[in-house]
Image (cartoon, rainbow, N blue to C red):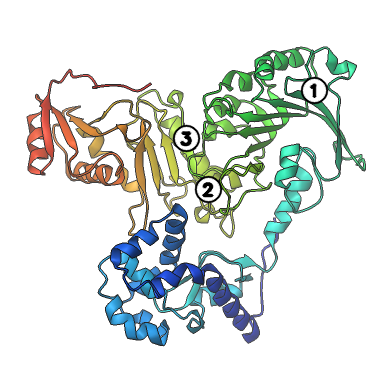
Amino acid sequence: MAPDIQYVEVTEELKAQNRKFAQQALGKSILDGAFEAFRTPPIHWNEENFARYYESSPSNIYYFDKILEKFKNLLDNGDKVVEFLTDEGKKLYPELKKIKNEKIKRLRIISYIDITKFVLTSDKLEGELSQGYVIKPDNDNIYITEDGKLDSYSRTPLINGSVERLIKDNSELRTFDYNSYYGRTGKSVEEGTYPGWTKTDVTKNPEYAKYKIGDNDGIKFELIKRDVPDPKKRNQGIILTIDAENEAGYAKTLELINQLKADKKEITSYRIINIGRNNANQSFINIFKALPDKIPQLELFFETHNTTSLIALEDKEIDELSLYTTGNSNAGGWSINPWALKKTAWVNMIDYNVSFDYKPGLRVATRLGFDDIAFEDSDFDGKDFSRINNGLRMVYWVRNNERVFQGGLGAGLKPDRNEGENSYPVGLDLSRVTKIKSLRNLIFSDIEKPSNKPRKLVRLVLYNDSETFEIDADELNNANFGVIDTGPFSRSKISFRNGNQTRKIKITSKNGVTKLNSSGLDNLQKLITLARDNFGPETEFKVPNTDKELFEQLEKLGKKVIQVDPNEKAEFEFS
């Protein structure tokens, strides 16, 4: 860890440079071409045309929402924005204010902003100069305050601790280490190579010939040696690569691992590629269970989002774990059960990570990042929430200084000492936990250090295997859906394991609770609103004919309610 800076002399030159870089950073984030359609649209365009342009692709929505967030505070402050408009924008402002679609109105106003008029940085940024934190021109987190000053959610220390950390990780934590701050390239990851090391195929050597690996099995043993030996470090190792796409090799994998353990053959690195490429449900849980209890390095390449088998690693002592894909690592849906990493010393998060400019169909090896955490059915017995809550605590607080548990945005300024400012995974996948219907009894605040900010969710996936999602009134009253971010520009969502096949809601009484209280009504509304792919104004509600209070309550709310037999079974189920 880089040392803290004790004092920096803040000169006028340093202030001016910081303002200049902040303005440059804001300018880089606003692509002029993207706003051309908002500033000089075709003559015939109306609000619907602008809305279609905004929604024309996921990348458009992502980009424009990001820009909206940068100017939100200023636009919320009445007509303050007028000071920062071009002359043309000032003339058009009265008409632009009349646009009904709030997002389109704001985007059109933003298109006329002259960023050169933002010449001051916030008091916060000015104050942080004395602490050694500055703005760099590539800062993507610049935003405008309500009074028109440049501010940022992130800053860069004058002494770059990130570079020092990368060098330290590469030289001290890697199994096949090297002294540099660069991670491995996509090509190096795919080929399993390391700077300063040389590999040789030894599959046919007498030592390994006994395992009868065929030329077409997709399995190979390689000897890797350090080019310049270091008497204080590991200088060679054996890498076992297994191609899961090769059916013949896949069939031999479990037996091979057991043979190697029986022979006490030390394998430095197990490397399994193409997991799930032939079959998204390809089973690896037994193979992972069979791995040795202590592993210097494990590299796994997943080609589908199915990472459930990783839970088999829970009790494995792994020095270095690397998780990759040759698909799109930035696509949604990648999740991990934190208990899978219980005894893993270091999760490699410094190798190549593909950018958001990823071209569909392009295959390049890239490390996985996880913005969603998941749990298994075995993590909850229907009564005891401690394993799930301890897993949440592991991610949000105890090990939140580790990059693998920091979600999409990464560390705060002091990740090891102020974990409350770190980023974190904003998705929670409970789709495999059959006995959980809501967020009831789940803890998203730091009970041991209340000063840390509570965590908020943006995505929640619940288990359901029929057309009807069934939940009781007591559960709804305590559903805790307030943990889900419902801010004005949030895109939070609730979904179900069976996708949009869930179309109806059944509410029952339980534990003597025969109707919804104010919290229950609020949670129900959040469920309907956030599960927008499943529910809406015409959603059918089912209530057992024995629950008259519930029936009458929902009817008074204007819901479409039908009474059903209390013993009614689901209309259909999905495997």
Residue 402 visible in the current orientation: no
Q: What element carries label 1?
A: loop
Q: What element carries label 2?
A: loop
Which kind of residue does numbered mark 3 sit on?
A: Ala
Classify the position of the N terminus by image quarter.
bottom right
Give the mark count: 3
207 or 40: nearer the viewer: 40
Residue 344 in the image: state x and y as whole percent: 64, 34
Mark 3 sits on what residue? 374
Residue for point 92% across, 40% down:
229
Mark 1 sits on what residue? 266
How far is the residue under mark 3 from the one under mark 2? 13 Å
Label disc, if present, on residue 407 of the rendered structure: 2
Residue 278 in the image: state x and y as whole percent: 58, 26
Instruction: Determine whether, in the image, residue 510 is placed left or right of residue 465.
Output: left
How far is the residue under mark 3 from the one under mark 1? 32 Å
Residue 521 visible in the current orientation: yes
Which kind of residue does numbered mark 1 sit on?
A: Glu
Q: Quadrant of residue 107?
A: bottom left
Q: Earlier in the sequence, mark 2 or mark 1?
A: 1
Label disc, if present, on residue 160 of the rendered structure: none
Q: Is mark 3 on a helix, strand or loop?
A: strand
Residue for point 75% across, 12% down:
262
Residue 460 in the image: state x and y as whole percent: 38, 41
Instruction: Determine whether, in the image, residue 126 is placed left or right of residue 389.
Output: right
Instruction: Determine whether, in the image, residue 305 is placed left or right of residue 176.
Output: left
Residue for point 54% across, 47% down:
330
